Image (cartoon, rainbow, N blue to C red):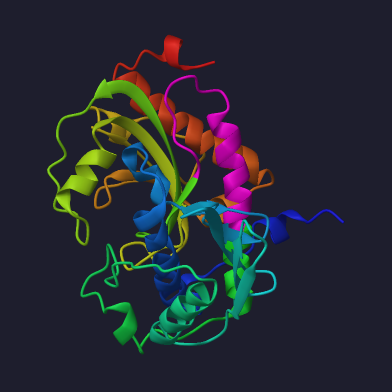
């Protein structure tokens, strides 16, 4: 049976699941750091992202000695599942437990599969991070809200993929960046960008400078934070061309944030639209077009 738009684009009030979000954010960082350590490097750190799957989030295959292994967050059965290319698997329940407990359970799980991993235990991109083995504070997991978040990621992933389909230039895969807990997609002009000044909290400058070594138009979704306490879509161009903040952007409800330095579209606008996919595509296309036109990108060569 086909899902209704309300099921595909459910409500996700930040204040109702913030504790679960904080815990889940840290769990995804633990798994994501395995990709930092073992996945083959790709430009702009694309190799570290998680991917949206039909049941949640996945690392995809990770090479290890003579096998590959894969780690999946299953937000339908609420399990973390590790599978190997030689037919073995291991599981642990996603339920309310501290980050410290999850970390130890995860390490025990991979050890039981004879996979010896070593990751940086310090969370990324967070103020005053608590090392994973010491974090007994974040310990909430509400399966209903985890599932709602997955549905939004799944629906958004489909729209982002459709958006990328008509671009001939260099473009990123749709990736879940666990450092910031956002799903993002990026287009490139093909030209070098001025060196990024760095200074991003929780990220070494060389990481940021590799990510922004070339001109980009980037868009994504994130569940909100203290700066904007509700889920939203965002879009920015780096370097930002003059006039970008006052461009004509669709749909109504989108606005330029002078604190975030990007265009923002509240998720509620998409969710309540009669055509959520079309509404989101309009935001993606008009913000890209504004940045690319004002930035003098060679759009004729870059677009299908």
Image mark count: 0
Q: Is residue 296 left or right of residue 175?
A: left
Q: Residue 214 or 60: which is nearer the viewer?
A: 60
**Is residue 138 visible in the rendered structure shown here?**
yes
Q: Residue at x 57, y 81 (%)?
A: 142
Residue that appears at 48% across and 84% down: 140
Q: Nearer the viewer, residue 165 or 243?
A: 165
Q: Nearer the viewer, residue 25 or 265?
A: 25
Residue 291 position in % (x across, y down): 34, 27
The correct choice, above or below, for 70 with respect to 303 in the image is below
Q: Is residue 173 above or below residue 70?
A: above
Q: Is residue 227 left or right of residue 67?
A: left
Position of the C terminus by quadrant: top right
Q: Quadrant of the N terminus?
A: bottom right
Q: Residue at x 25, y 37 (%)?
A: 212
Horizontal side of 234 relative to 75 (left or right) equals left
Q: Residue furthest top?
A: 300
Q: Depth check: 52 or 219 in front?
A: 52
Give the quarter of the image for residue 41: top left
Measuring from the top left, give residue 185's x and y in whole percent: 45, 40
Relative to 85, say whether 126 is above or below. below
Q: Quarter-wise, where is residue 215 in the image?
A: top left
Q: Which residues are magenta?
A: 152-174
Q: Is residue 158 magenta?
A: yes
Residue at horizontal 36%, vertical 89%? 136
């Amino acid at each position: 049976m086909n899902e209704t738009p309300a099921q595909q684009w459910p409500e996700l009030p930040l204040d109702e699941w913030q504790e679960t979000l904080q815990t889940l954010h840290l769990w995804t960082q633990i798994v994501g750091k395995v990709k930092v350590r073992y996945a083959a490097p790709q430009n702009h750190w694309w190799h570290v992202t998680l991917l949206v799957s039909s049941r949640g989030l996945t690392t995809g295959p990770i090479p290890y000695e003579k096998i590959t292994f894969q780690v999946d967050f299953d937000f339908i059965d609420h399990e973390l599942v590790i599978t190997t290319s030689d037919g073995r698997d291991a599981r642990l329940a996603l339920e309310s437990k501290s980050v410290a407990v999850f970390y130890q359970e995860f390490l025990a799980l991979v050890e039981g599969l004879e996979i010896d991993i070593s990751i940086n235990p310090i969370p990324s991109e967070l103020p005053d991070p608590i090392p994973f083995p010491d974090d007994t504070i974040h310990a909430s997991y509400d399966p209903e809200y985890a599932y709602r978040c997955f549905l939004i990621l799944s629906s958004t992933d489909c729209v982002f993929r459709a958006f990328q389909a008509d671009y001939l230039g260099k473009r990123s895969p749709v990736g879940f960046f666990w450092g910031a807990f956002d799903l993002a997609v990026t287009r490139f002009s093909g030209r070098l960008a001025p060196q990024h000044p760095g200074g991003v909290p929780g990220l070494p400058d060389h990481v940021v400078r590799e990510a922004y070594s070339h001109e980009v138009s980037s868009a994504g979704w994130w569940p909100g934070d203290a700066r904007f306490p509700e889920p939203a879509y965002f879009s920015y161009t780096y370097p930002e061309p003059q006039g970008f903040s006052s461009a004509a952007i669709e749909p109504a409800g989108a606005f330029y944030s002078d604190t975030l330095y990007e265009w923002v579209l509240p998720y509620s606008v998409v969710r309540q639209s009669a055509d959520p996919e079309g509404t989101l595509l309009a935001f993606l296309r008009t913000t890209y077009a504004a940045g690319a036109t004002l930035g003098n990108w060679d759009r004729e060569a870059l677009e299908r």
